[in-house]
């Protein structure tokens, strides 16, 4: 197994696993409050190893094995973590694979580093979720109390959204105008997703400037797309995409 390494960025030590191999380097961007050891990241890493492909997994500031406090993190901070990995940890072209919130970060990173990002793969990509992912009552609670704490459907730890994260997300919204990204993009989305409406991937495909965009809908798929068949679809999508870069 590739060893854990660290990169100092923004005053925090970011934990990462870098597997050398053929370019482009795949970089996996986890969802909110997730980390590099999740199922999709691990399966994609195993696929990269079998194919001799370079891959980088890492934890955002305040997540997993990385330094920093989770409740001090913002979307802008995590975007900068992604850019630090692109700039300092790998060379050559990269393919960003973003899950849920990671799909928002991949767009922000591609806009900031167009010469380095060769392609994007979104898995239930959730750009602008600070706007549409909360009710008015929840938004008022975030502004009034400084954070919103709710039970998580994915684990015992509660789901915490801080005011500073929410405000950072609102300042980085993209979907109000065409998204100036020209590289190939693949968007996978389950139509039984109860967290991010599958129609959001269709709208994202419409907003992207690139002509090479495909939206792949899984009729019986949920938000996580972590079943064996879902993971096989992800691997097949990656195979077809990297072979043309």
Image: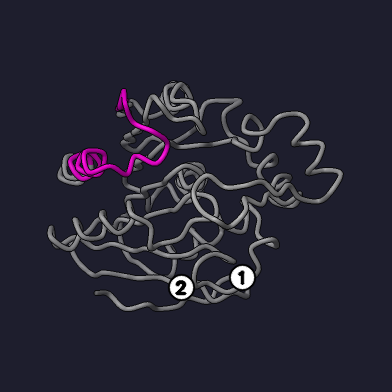
Locate residue 189: give its quadrant: top left
Q: Nearer the viewer, residue 93 or 36?
A: 36
As measured in the structure, the alpha-carbon distance from the residue carrying label 1 to the one carrying label 2 is: 13 Å
Q: Tell me if I can see residue 227 in this picture.
A: yes
Name the residue beneath numbered marker 1: 10
Q: From where the camera sits, is residue 241 visible?
A: no
Foreground residue among 232 and 209: 232
The single residue placed furthest to the front in the displayed view is 156
Q: Is residue 131 left or right of residue 202?
A: right
Picture layout, residue 231 above or below residue 52: above
Please provide the residue range marked out in magenta: 216-237
Question: Number of numbered discs present?
Answer: 2
Tell me whether the residue at label 1 lies in contact with that at label 2, contact meaning CB atoms closer than 8 angstroms: no
- Tell me if residue 3 comes above or below residue 162 in the rendering: below
Query: In the image, what residue occupies the spot 44% across and 28% down?
Result: 208
Expressed as whole percent of the image width and height from the top left, the position of residue 192 reads: 40, 26
| 71 sits left or right of 100 in the view | right
Q: Does the magenta segment cover residue 85?
A: no
Where's the N terminus, which quadrant? bottom left
* Res 42 quadrant in image: bottom left
The label number, if any, that marks residue 15 in the structure image: 2
Q: Residue 116 in the image: state x and y as whole percent.
A: 37, 53
The residue sitting at 62% across, 50% down in the picture is 159
């Amino acid at each position: 197994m590739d060893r854990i390494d660290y990169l100092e960025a923004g005053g925090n030590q970011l934990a990462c696993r870098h597997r050398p191999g053929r370019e482009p380097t795949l970089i996996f961007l986890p969802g909110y409050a997730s980390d590099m050891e999740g199922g999709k990241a691990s399966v994609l890493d195993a696929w990269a190893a079998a194919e001799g492909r370079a891959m980088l997994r890492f934890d955002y500031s305040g997540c997993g094995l990385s330094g920093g406090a989770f409740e001090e993190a913002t979307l802008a901070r995590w975007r900068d973590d992604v850019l630090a990995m692109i700039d300092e940890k790998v060379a050559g072209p990269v393919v960003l694979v973003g899950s849920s919130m990671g799909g928002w970060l991949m767009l922000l990173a591609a806009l900031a580093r167009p010469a380095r990002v060769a392609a994007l793969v979104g898995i239930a990509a959730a750009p602008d979720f600070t706007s549409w992912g909360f009710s008015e009552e929840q938004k008022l609670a975030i502004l009034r109390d400084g954070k919103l704490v709710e039970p998580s459907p994915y684990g015992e730890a509660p789901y915490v959204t801080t005011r500073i994260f929410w405000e950072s997300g609102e300042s980085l919204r993209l979907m109000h105008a065409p998204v100036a990204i020209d590289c190939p993009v693949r968007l996978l989305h389950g139509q039984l997703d109860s967290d991010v409406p599958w129609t959001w991937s269709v709208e994202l495909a419409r907003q992207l400037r690139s002509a090479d965009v495909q939206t792949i809908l899984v009729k019986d798929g949920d938000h996580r797309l972590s079943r064996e068949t879902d993971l096989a679809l992800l691997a097949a999508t990656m195979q077809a995409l990297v072979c043309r870069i």
